[in-house]
């Protein structure tokens, strides 16, 4: 009798854990969706192969990211609009689709770098994932940010890192 109770307890714990895991996956996207995020800092630097670095951008209030539901109703894609001003005063304002990997350690913006359906996504590594604060980093070389690294023509002398800190402004 006790082994039967133990068996049902193990099954119950397993089902609860899998249910909570699924809810956690949806919580990440729900936390981002219908939200306005201020780009409170934008830092970009060169990382040389000898380990030295050179900062060429260190901005505050660099723009805004708006994340809303996908107009086609997808649960795994969201629509993202990014309005950004860089250290030279150049601005970009684009709308595209946003997606995440299964573990929510990467956030991708579809076809930002070019119009090709492959190798043109701007993919961020999620360094900090909190309810009201996100820190995302993108890596690359030769002026392009990407993941995975472009092994065909990557600069062998240095790599680039771009880090943005997002602070939740409010719901849309």
Image (tube, rainbow, N blue to C red):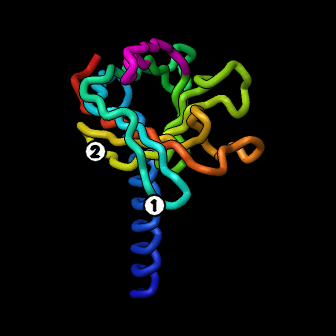
Q: Is residue 30 left or right of residue 121?
A: left
Q: Specify which label sits upstream in the sequence, 2 or 1.
A: 1
Q: Is residue 156 above or below residue 77?
A: below
Q: Is residue 169 left or right of residue 163?
A: left
Segment colored magenta: 82-96
The residue depicted at 52 percent of the width and 14 percent of the height is 71
Which label is found at residue 161?
none
Question: Where does the image place residue 126, in percent across and percent down from the top left?
Answer: 42, 46
Q: Main secondary structure of the magenta part?
A: strand
Q: Which residue is mark 1?
A: 15
Q: Secondary structure at mark 1?
A: helix
Image label count: 2
Q: Is residue 155 left or right of residue 166?
A: right
Magenta stretch contains residue 84 = yes
Nearest the camera: 63 or 47? 47
Magenta stretch contains residue 64 = no
Residue 39 visible in the shown view: yes
Question: Where does the image place residue 165, in percent across and percent down from the top left?
Answer: 31, 37
Question: Which quarter of the figure is the N terminus placed in?
Answer: bottom left
Q: Secondary structure at mark 2?
A: loop
Question: Which quarter of the figure is the C terminus placed in?
Answer: top left
C-alpha span from label 2 to label 1: 26 Å
Question: Where does the image place residue 127, in percent across and percent down from the top left?
Answer: 38, 49
Q: Which residue is mark 2?
A: 130
Question: Where does the image place residue 88, in percent across and percent down from the top left?
Answer: 39, 19
Q: Is residue 50 above or below residue 138?
A: below
The residue depicted at 66 percent of the width and 50 percent of the height is 156
The residue depicted at 55 percent of the width and 23 percent of the height is 97
């Amino acid at each position: 009798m006790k082994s039967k109770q133990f068996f049902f307890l193990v099954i119950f714990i397993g089902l609860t854990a899998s249910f909570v895991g699924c809810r956690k996956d949806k919580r990440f996207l729900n936390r981002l969706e219908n939200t306005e995020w201020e780009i409170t800092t934008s830092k970009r630097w060169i990382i040389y192969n000898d380990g030295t670095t050179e900062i060429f951008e260190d901005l505050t209030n660099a723009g805004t990211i708006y994340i809303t539901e996908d107009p086609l109703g997808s649960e795994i894609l969201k629509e993202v609009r990014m309005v950004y001003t860089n250290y030279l005063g150049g601005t970009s304002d684009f709308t595209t689709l946003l997606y995440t990997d299964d573990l929510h350690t990467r956030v991708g913006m579809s076809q930002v770098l070019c119009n090709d359906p492959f190798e043109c996504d701007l993919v961020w590594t999620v360094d900090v994932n909190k309810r009201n604060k996100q820190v995302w980093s993108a890596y690359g070389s030769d002026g392009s940010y990407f993941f995975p690294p472009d092994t065909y023509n990557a600069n062998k002398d240095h790599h680039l890192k771009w880090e943005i800190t997002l602070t939740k402004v409010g719901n849309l």
